[in-house]
Amino acid sequence: MSQLTRADWQAMSERLQLEGRAFINGDYVSAVGGDTFASINPANGMPLALIAGCDEQDAALAVAHARAAFRRGDWSRCAPAERKRTLLKLARLMEQHQEELALLETLDMGKPIGDSLHVDLPSAINCIGWNAEAIDKVYGEVAPTDRHSLGLITREPLGVVAAIVPWNFPLMMSCWKIAPALAAGNSVILKPSEKSPLSAIRLAALAREAGVPDGVFQVLPGFGHTVGKALALHNDVDCLAFTGSTRVGKQLTQYAGQSNLKRTFMECGGKSANIICADAGNLDTIAREAAMAIYYNQGEVCIAGSRLLVENSIKDELVERIIAYAEQLQPGDPLDPATRMGAIVDAAQLDTICGYVAKGVDEGARLRMGGEPVLTDSGGHYFPPTLFDGVNNRHTIAREEIFGPVLSVIGFDTLDEAIEIANDSPYGLAAAVWTRDLDKALTASRRLESGQVYVNNYAGGDMTVPFGGVKQSGNGRDKSLHSLSEYSQLKTTWIALHGN
């Protein structure tokens, strides 16, 4: 565990030399058109750095270099063991620079430094290393043909992959995309969110130092409607991997169809149900887990347990315990290692959260805790843990993804009722059920319309299991060998044998 203090982190932030340029064909470069925009620290509203505002010209340039690198073959056709060695070196370099990378995450999007250093960075590093280790252990197949034929089934890289990632877990989500895509032999263009581009830009230099060839990994900061759209519409991009809102995911899918029918993987929004049965067990433990399921990372989590469905016989007691626990989670300076909740990413997101709270009150839900911005004299954007009781599933705060620390509590009497409420949503990213009855847990897991179901925990999992959703939460999967396979395509080679 790091022993750095708030003063240490602050001093380190003042020494940082922040890079804001794009990374194209092995070098940092300004945007072709010369556009820039400011990266703003959400903790105090102060500018951090000027970032290259890439557009269609930069996208065309990066795609051309990515395609040339793919055809050159020094990455796409090299032995899997060679790619493994390079990616393992990248993971080691990330570990050596983990404090710097964690600081960039915290400065850029406001999350507590303890989470950046002890959650996000280890996860990102492990993702690179895990995929590196996996790539030389994935085999092709031989089809069960007759004796006059040999059917070979092999996997080949897709070509040029464009990855568009969100701002809430900037480096971790980037690695979830680029690690399997690079391991499979693709050329990758990463478009980080304009709200949190700094760690992705820094990662590019570490990849170059690790030995990733020029053109194989490039980073284009900028806005979705400019460079993001250009990548999605480009006819020489073979795959588009995205994590973000359902609205943007739908638009990107249309762009893929309008261009070259590129493969798309969309991990979109969620409004996840966290179901607590009366026989779930220790209410103090459950209250703590239910609170963290929504308040962790300021609620800016795609799988946040934002709908808490509680059996009515224990609902009031559990709500009181959640409120008591959440009082300990008040927002504070993200650079303080003791801070449990940091700043909301920007003023626009803070306004969105405030708007949803107002709708909750107007529609008749009972505001029990929070509900207004705090630390307003800091210049930053802070919102406390907020809880609504008396919510029904038709309320706006129960239907739409808020992406903030707002919990909606809904009561139920039977598990059938809870599952019906949980499934009454356009989303299907995550769900959880808490019960000591194994039959009840497994039955609920089968019936819940969700890409992942947690039993007696929330947000469990590691690199060995896939992550993704159903319905309007998207398609495709991050993590696990399933993710690795999605960044390759199958080829059948049928050989006629003419011997006896």
Image (cartoon, helix red, strand yellow):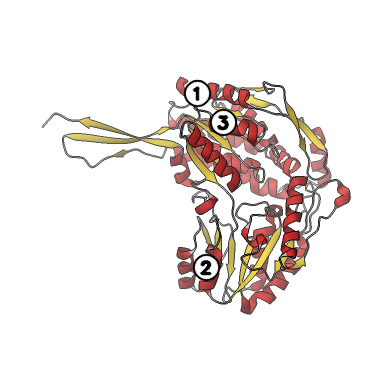
- Residue 61 lies, with reference to residue 96, above or below; the image says above
Mark 1 neighbour density, 10 Å: few (under 14) some (14–19) many (20 or more): many
Mark 1 against mark 2, which lies toward the viewer? 2
In the rendering, at what x and y percent does residue 459 appear?
Answer: 58, 57
Mark 3 against mark 1, which lies toward the viewer? 3
Distance Cα–Cα, label 3 vs label 1: 13 Å
Mark 3 neighbour density, 10 Å: few (under 14) some (14–19) many (20 or more): many
Amino acid type shown at disc 3: Leu
The residue labelled by disc 2 is 420
Q: Is residue 12 left or right of residue 257?
A: right
Marks 1 and 2 in Cβ contact (< 8 Å): no
- Residue 276 lies, with reference to residue 143, above or below; the image says below
- Which label number is shown at residue 67? 1
Q: Which of marks 2 and 3 is nearer the N terminus?
A: 3
- Residue 149 lies, with reference to residue 299, above or below; the image says above
In the rendering, at what x and y percent does residue 328 appear?
Answer: 77, 62
Marks 3 and 1 in Cβ contact (< 8 Å): no
Q: Seen from this angle, which residue lies furthest right?
A: 377
Distance Cα–Cα, label 1 vs label 2: 48 Å
- Most foreground residue, 256 or 95: 256
Mark 2 neighbour density, 10 Å: few (under 14) some (14–19) many (20 or more): few
- The image quadrant where one finds the C terminus is top left
- Most foreground residue, 305 or 471: 471
- Quarter of the image where one finds residue 188: top right
Q: In this view, does 400 lie to the left or right of 65?
A: right
| SS at badge 1 | helix
- Quarter of the image where one finds residue 215: top right
Amino acid type shown at disc 2: Glu
The residue labelled by disc 3 is 231
Q: Earlier in the sequence, mark 3 or mark 1?
A: 1
Which residue is at a point 19% across and 34% down the rendered structure image? Answer: 149
